[in-house]
Image (spheres, rainbow, N blue to C red):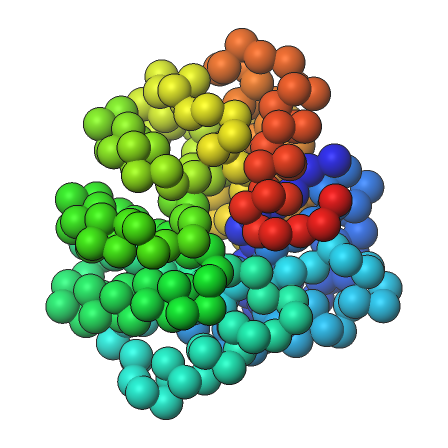
Amino acid sequence: MLIDIGVNLSNSRFDKDIEQVIERAQTAGIERLILTGTSVEESRAVIAICEKFESQFPGILWATVGIHPHDAKTLSPSNLAALRKLATDQYVVAIGETGLDFNRILSTEKQQEKSFEAHIELAIELKMPLFLHERDAAAKQIEMLKSYRDNICNGVIHCFTGDKKTLFRYLDMDLHIGITGWICDERRGQELQKIIKNIPLDRLMLETDAPYLTPRNMPAKSKNGRNEPAFLAHILEGIAAVRAEHIDEIAKATTATAIKFFGFTK
């Protein structure tokens, strides 16, 4: 059984068949889906999805709440208060998606840093792990995390695509690493394929980031090119191949890591 730690199930591309998407994930051996909150509105939306399908899919859907760095400019006292309240919901297991993105400056660097700091402090206050985003901002992100290192409960770098130096710096801070279908990309994923063996299994977790990042080498992609949680098994196969380890070993270890990280009962 597997856990997909990052799914954008509130995305409009899932509106017409969300129930079938969850069913296919179950059939593929995905036992839990963690739905990503990327704004106050989306955080409310993912919690609503968890509530709506709890009776039909008990214990499968969980959520994070946060404001993506792209939308850091929307941070306000009222939005932060809303996140604090949402974070206490029974389905919420982490604070985020938060962090820094200096690749696409959709909010200024200062706005992102202010929002990130607020998320870190909220996670510390509530004793919850952080679900972290980072693009072209590793130095600043690490600098900010270091100043809170002794108080942070836990953190995972969602959709890691960095280089070896960045990987080791994150691991040295006791952070976890989330791997997506990027590992299956024969072009963009070459660097990641070279360094993934350096991630200890007790720090490695799996995610699709669906509907984005559909594995390029999927033998049969969906007609609309959409990624979905059921494809996590294919990502697992890709990781096992480049690490030269048995699929069952990685599945068991990464699931155990996610259970411990998010505080699930087995």
Image x and y of residue 19, in percent: 77, 61
* Residue 159 visible: no
Q: At x 57% / y 51%, what residue is drawn?
A: 262
The residue drawn where x is 45% and y is 78% is 83
Image coords of residue 266 (percent x, y): 74, 44
Residue 244 position (above or below residue 184): above
The furthest residue to the top: 244
**x, y percentage for residue 192?**
36, 25
218 relative to 73 in the view: left or right: right
The residue sitting at 66% across, 76% down in the picture is: 48
Task: Report which quarter residue 73 is drawn in.
Answer: bottom left
Q: Is residue 241 visible?
A: yes
Viewer-side residue, 53 vs 199: 199
Picture layout, residue 60 above or below residue 159:
below
**Could you tell me residue 18's position as x and y percent?**
71, 62
In front of the other: 49 or 257: 257
- Residue 54 found in image quarter: bottom right
Above or below, 185 relative to 82: above
Furthest residue in direction bottom, as rendered: 78
Q: Residue furthest right?
A: 56
Q: Quadrant of the N terminus?
A: top right
Name the residue nearer the viewer: 76 or 171.
171
Occupied quadrant, residue 160: top left
Residue located 39% across and 44% down the image = 157
Q: Is residue 61 left or right of residue 197?
A: right
Q: How many marks?
A: 0
